[in-house]
Image (cartoon, rainbow, N blue to C red):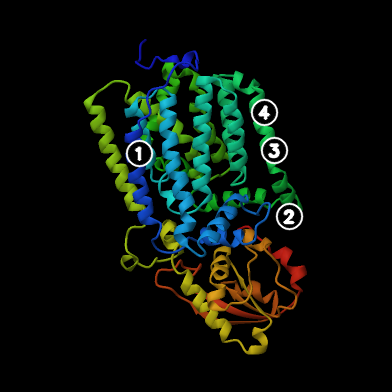
């Protein structure tokens, strides 16, 4: 049966040219996406994780308890170029997100897609509520997703050309991604299952693929040595994520949230792409890429992963869907695609932080704030630092000389560390997440300002515990930087050097 998709992909031949690249159309999409992101990156304040990346970047290490070293290194570089600049911190996320739009369009081209298919793929990426919106702040997701998109393009191009240098480049991309987070092995596991079930099995026999794997393993050695010295905390993050999933709907909401992350147009193309990859003979060599999201859905549901973990596998399927959608010129297809793109764009605009801060309403409680995490996670940090600084200055001079600050959350510690110089604060510590590995309070610290601790727990560690301050911010995150207590804790019952290792926690 003729589908209009018959191309050279069944018999890869490097001499066969791909369709021309839709330079003008894709560039227009990138310009619009860039305008949206650049208009949003100066809004509100630092997100809690961004403050943590800055803190980690000022304490560079081979690895961290909850991530690889690449994000802290990027944060440190931007902090050196433009100290304390929120916009500068976010520029790398914007750039890789825009690059991923171009790569997704190139993937459609490699699949034989026309200019219209390439532009449609780019629009789908740029109007995805997750794929684009994550680019307005520095995050592991922004970098990780862009690298997954690149891997998809490299595999598609290898299938078409059989150029083994592409597999070496895939190894380089994988090695870089492992310095961000440890999710990319799931991608390769899913790809291997797809290749074994659908072909081309030749991929797994290529030495270049395994040389790339060896490169990844070699570059991981410093991180692995660090993890081994510290008891493999990053593996413990999997259990923490699973525990968080159990309290937020877990497997029940996994599939709906994972699908909604693609956006309206994106999800439509994902569905079309799955049909194209499994039904049409012309795309048979790429069928294994349709297996990848199915395996990822199963793997992350079984392991209680987060729904957005699968999103990096979408763009290559979207590209296949765009090829199918545009295979024949039809006015109704253009109209429907345009309508879906408009709906997707509206959801993206609604998700970006365009509303003036003065028009925001306080979060009713922590759950309400968590539901709008990308908004309330960026507010209230200067006020927190001001409140803690006031409590610190209220201490008598003898106690102040031996005082430190300890916070319940790594976000709190990161914020206070960021504002520490301006507000005249002492050293900041937290037993939470990666911040707990940045250092142990000195045994000479006999007075502690503890931010938001549990009173009963604090009394088990200190001779005296007294509330000396309360933090409230109009738009803060309840229990994180608003509606929380500052405690004065004196005379630790156990020296910090002995107590701290037992206090460390990832959750």
Q: Position of residue 17 (x, y in %)?
A: 43, 19
Cα–Cα span, label 4 and label 3? 10 Å
Mark 2, mark 4: which one is toward the viewer?
Answer: 4
Cα–Cα span, label 2 and label 4? 29 Å
Cα–Cα span, label 3 and label 2? 19 Å
Write down the residue under mark 1.
27
Dot placed on the residue nearer the N-terminal end, 3 or 2:
3
Q: Position of residue 179 (x, y in %)?
A: 62, 46
Q: Position of residue 36 (x, y in %)?
A: 34, 50
Dot placed on the residue nearer the N-terminal end, 2 or 4:
4
Helix, strand or loop at label 4? It is helix
Say whether marks 4 and 3 touch (CB < 8 Å): no
Mark 1, mark 2: which one is toward the viewer?
Answer: 1
Query: Could you say which disc has been placed on residue 230 in the image?
Result: 2
Dot placed on the residue nearer the N-terminal end, 1 or 2:
1
Dot placed on the residue nearer the N-terminal end, 1 or 3:
1
Query: Could you say which disc has been placed on residue 217 in the image?
Result: 3
Q: Position of residue 502 (x, y in %)?
A: 72, 64
Dot placed on the residue nearer the N-terminal end, 4 or 3:
4
Mark 3, mark 2: which one is toward the viewer?
Answer: 3
Q: Residues within 10 Å of mark 3 (few under 14, many from 20)?
A: some
Query: Could you say which disc has been placed on residue 210 in the image?
Result: 4
Helix, strand or loop at label 3? It is helix
Q: Residues within 10 Å of mark 1 (few under 14, many from 20)?
A: some
Residue at 35%, 30% in the rendered image: 22
């Amino acid at each position: 049966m003729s589908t209009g998709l018959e191309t050279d992909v069944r018999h890869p031949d490097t001499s066969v040219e791909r369709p021309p690249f839709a330079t003008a159309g894709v560039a227009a999409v990138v310009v619009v996406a860039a305008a949206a992101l650049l208009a949003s990156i100066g809004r509100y304040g630092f997100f809690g994780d961004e403050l943590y990346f800055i803190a980690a970047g000022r304490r560079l290490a081979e690895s961290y308890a909850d991530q690889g070293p690449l994000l802290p290194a990027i944060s440190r570089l931007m902090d050196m170029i433009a100290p304390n600049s929120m916009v500068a911190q976010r520029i790398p996320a914007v750039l890789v997100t825009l690059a991923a739009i171009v790569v997704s369009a190139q993937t459609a081209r490699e699949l034989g897609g026309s200019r219209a298919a390439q532009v449609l793929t780019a629009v789908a990426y740029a109007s995805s509520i997750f794929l684009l919106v994550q680019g307005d702040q520095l995050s592991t997701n922004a970098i990780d997703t862009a690298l997954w998109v690149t891997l998809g393009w490299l595999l598609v191009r290898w299938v078409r050309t059989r150029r083994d240098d592409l597999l070496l480049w895939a190894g380089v991309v994988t090695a870089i991604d492992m310095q961000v987070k440890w999710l990319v092995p799931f991608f390769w596991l899913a790809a291997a299952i797809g290749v074994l079930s659908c072909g081309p099995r030749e991929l797994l026999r290529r030495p270049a693929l395994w040389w790339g794997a060896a490169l990844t393993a070699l570059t991981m050695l410093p991180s692995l040595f660090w993890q081994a010295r510290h008891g493999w905390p990053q593996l413990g993050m999997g259990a923490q994520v699973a525990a968080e999933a159990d309290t937020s709907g877990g497997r029940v909401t996994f599939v709906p949230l994972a699908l909604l992350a693609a956006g309206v147009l994106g999800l439509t193309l994902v569905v079309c792409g799955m049909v194209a990859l499994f039904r049409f003979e012309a795309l048979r060599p790429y069928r294994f890429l349709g297996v990848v999201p199915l395996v990822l859905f199963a793997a992350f549901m079984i392991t209680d992963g987060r729904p957005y973990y699968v999103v990096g596998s979408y763009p290559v399927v979207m590209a296949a869907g765009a090829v199918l959608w545009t295979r024949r010129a039809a006015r109704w297809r253009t109209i429907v695609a345009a309508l879906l793109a408009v709906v997707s764009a509206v959801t993206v605009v609604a998700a970006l932080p365009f509303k003036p801060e003065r028009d925001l309403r306080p979060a009713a409680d922590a759950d309400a704030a968590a539901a709008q995490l990308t908004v309330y996670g960026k507010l209230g940090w200067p006020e927190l630092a001001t409140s803690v600084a006031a409590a610190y200055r209220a201490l008598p001079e003898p106690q102040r000389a031996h005082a430190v600050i300890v916070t319940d959350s790594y976000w709190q510690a990161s914020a206070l560390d960021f504002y520490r110089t301006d507000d005249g604060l002492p050293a900041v510590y937290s037993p939470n997440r990666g911040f707990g590995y940045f250092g142990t309070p000195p045994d000479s610290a006999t007075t502690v300002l503890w931010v938001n601790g549990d009173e009963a727990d604090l009394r088990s560690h200190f001779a005296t515990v007294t509330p000396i301050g309360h933090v409230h911010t109009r738009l803060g995150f309840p229990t994180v930087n608003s509606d929380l207590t500052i405690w004065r804790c004196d005379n630790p019952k156990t020296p910090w050097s002995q107590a701290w290792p037992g206090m460390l926690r990832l959750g």
